[in-house]
Image (tube, rainbow, N blue to C red):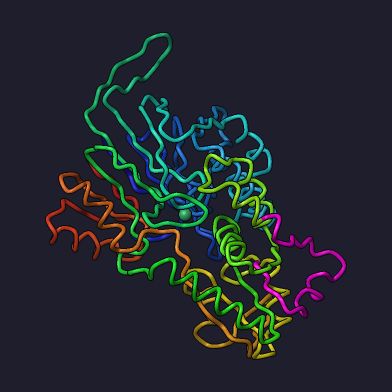
């Protein structure tokens, strides 16, 4: 088996791994400006998508422009989320060189889509493939690829091209508990693992500690008469924060794309840790449609507003943060890692940020609460402990080479492929 890294090697964003020039695992885009896409021309026989985040699924519609549609295999939530992301990308960049697909391609995606549950093996490009819960967001999967009975059909003849490699592509995963999804526990026996390493040099605080501090902080501000804006990613984080608020009886408004995503996820209760809890949290939250100056009125209230975007690069947060910024009683409670160069990061580091084209000083309090959906260093090592006799290829991180080196020092056979590199397994 040969795997080529078309993106996501030594970087976070535009994940894409091509197996034997035939089976494509993920096809993402990095949302920096201008957006970045996987390298090389690719014409796969089939695609498997690990989960519905932009950096793993964002460029999949671009594979729909050729005559033969490659089947796209994923879980039902991943299909829904990827479609929502594609429509959002069209809205932001459609008909410009920044968008590599059209609305026709997005429609054709529906024809190419094949959905699967966890643990159900299926055939893709002749390989046996199985998805396992990755514990990252609803529908997220580890992808097991088995070439031991590769079947390539040409005409009426099926050629057997048996290999002997079983590969596990982790996608993004979490071994810790979140309210929205159950943690990753499957450890299928394989010959090689492609392992994400987003937080290979970070130790997360216990989730209960993060949650407790967040709730206390939010309550304090509301008690003092202030308004709290909680920027949160639409997919996963908005719902996690809604669940935290509901569990602690904190009333909140919810605004932005996270509303639509919440409704989508509720349609797939088998991919949620506690579907009833999400239904309850949705009933308790007040959804905002933004009509008739509603946002400006809400921003004056003594309340909590959960809204996109998570790094303050757009969305209704562009109304809320400027509206509450001048008063130190108010608070901006960021809920996840802020990538360098984003307004969220700028705000944390300098106390002002470029919001909607204007650089604005923020006198409101600014906090960062690390609600992560990724395994930290200990989580990664705990996962990899099941793969001590297995080739480990480290990807999806800023420090993949350093982590691979640390693993080698610990007795692993580990490497960190570079962008465009092909590895023989
Ligand atoms: Zn992800």
* Residue at x 33% of width, y 59% of height: 197
Position of residue 21 in the picture relative to residue 13 (left or right): left
Q: Nearer the viewer, residue 9 or 330?
A: 330
- On whether residue 293 falls in the magenta region, the answer is yes
Where 185 sits versus 149, above or below? below
* Residue at x 61% of width, y 29% of height: 111
The x and y percentages for residue 166 are: 26, 34
The x and y percentages for residue 97 are: 61, 54
Q: Nearer the viewer, residue 307 or 39?
A: 307
Where 299 sits versus 38, above or below? below
Position of residue 422 in the picture relative to residue 274 (left or right): left
Position of residue 143 in the picture relative to residue 180 (left or right): left
The x and y percentages for residue 417 are: 27, 53
Quarter placement of the N terminus: top left
Where 40 sits versus 237, above or below? above
Which residue reaches farthest right? 292
* Residue at x 47% of width, y 74% of height: 340
The x and y percentages for residue 414 are: 19, 53
Range covered by the magenta-colored residues: 282-306
- Asked where in the image residue 313 lies, by quadrant, the reply is bottom right
* Residue at x 42% of width, y 8% of height: 156
Quarter placement of the C terminus: top left
* Badge count: 0
- Asked where in the image residue 248 lies, by quadrant, the reply is bottom right
Q: Nearer the viewer, residue 251 or 45?
A: 251
- On whether residue 283 falls in the magenta region, the answer is yes
């Amino acid at each position: 088996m040969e795997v080529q890294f078309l993106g996501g090697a030594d970087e976070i964003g535009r994940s894409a791994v091509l197996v034997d020039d035939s089976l494509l695992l993920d096809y993402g885009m990095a949302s920096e400006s201008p957006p970045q896409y996987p390298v090389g021309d690719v014409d796969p026989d089939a695609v498997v998508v690990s989960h519905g985040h932009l950096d793993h699924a964002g460029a999949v519609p671009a594979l729909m422009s050729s005559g033969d549609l490659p089947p796209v295999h994923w879980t039902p939530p991943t299909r829904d989320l990827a479609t929502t992301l594609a429509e959002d990308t069209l809205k932001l960049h459609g008909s410009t060189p920044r968008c590599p697909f059209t609305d026709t391609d997005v429609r054709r995606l529906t024809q190419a889509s094949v959905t699967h549950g966890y643990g159900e093996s299926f055939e893709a490009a002749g390989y046996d493939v199985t998805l396992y819960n990755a514990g990252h967001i609803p529908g997220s999967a580890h992808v097991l690829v088995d070439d031991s009975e590769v079947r390539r059909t040409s005409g009426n003849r099926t050629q057997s091209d048996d290999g002997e490699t079983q590969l596990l592509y982790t996608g993004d995963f979490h071994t810790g508990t979140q309210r929205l999804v159950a943690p990753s526990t499957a450890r299928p026996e394989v010959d090689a693992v492609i392992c994400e390493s987003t937080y290979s040099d970070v130790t997360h605080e216990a989730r209960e500690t993060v949650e407790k501090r967040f709730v206390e902080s939010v309550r304090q501000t509301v008690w003092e008469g202030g308004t709290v804006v909680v920027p949160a990613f639409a997919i996963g984080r908005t719902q996690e924060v809604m669940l935290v608020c509901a569990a602690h009886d904190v009333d909140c408004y919810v605004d932005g794309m996270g509303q639509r995503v919440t409704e989508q996820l509720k349609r797939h209760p088998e991919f949620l840790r506690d579907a009833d809890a999400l239904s309850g949290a949705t009933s308790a939250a007040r959804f905002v449609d933004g009509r008739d100056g509603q946002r400006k009125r809400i921003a004056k209230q003594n309340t909590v507003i959960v809204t996109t975007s998570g790094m303050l690069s757009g969305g209704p947060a562009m109304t809320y943060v400027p509206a509450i910024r001048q008063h130190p009683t108010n608070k901006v409670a960021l809920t996840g890692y802020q990538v360098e160069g984003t307004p969220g990061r700028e705000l944390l580091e300098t106390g002002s940020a470029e919001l909607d084209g204007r650089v604005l000083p923020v006198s409101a309090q600014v906090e960062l609460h690390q609600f992560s959906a990724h395994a930290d260093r200990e989580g990664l090592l705990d996962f990899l402990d099941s793969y001590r006799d297995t080739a480990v290829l480290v990807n999806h991180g800023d420090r993949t080479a350093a982590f691979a080196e640390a693993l080698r020092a610990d007795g692993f056979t580990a490497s960190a492929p570079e962008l465009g590199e092909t590895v023989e397994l």
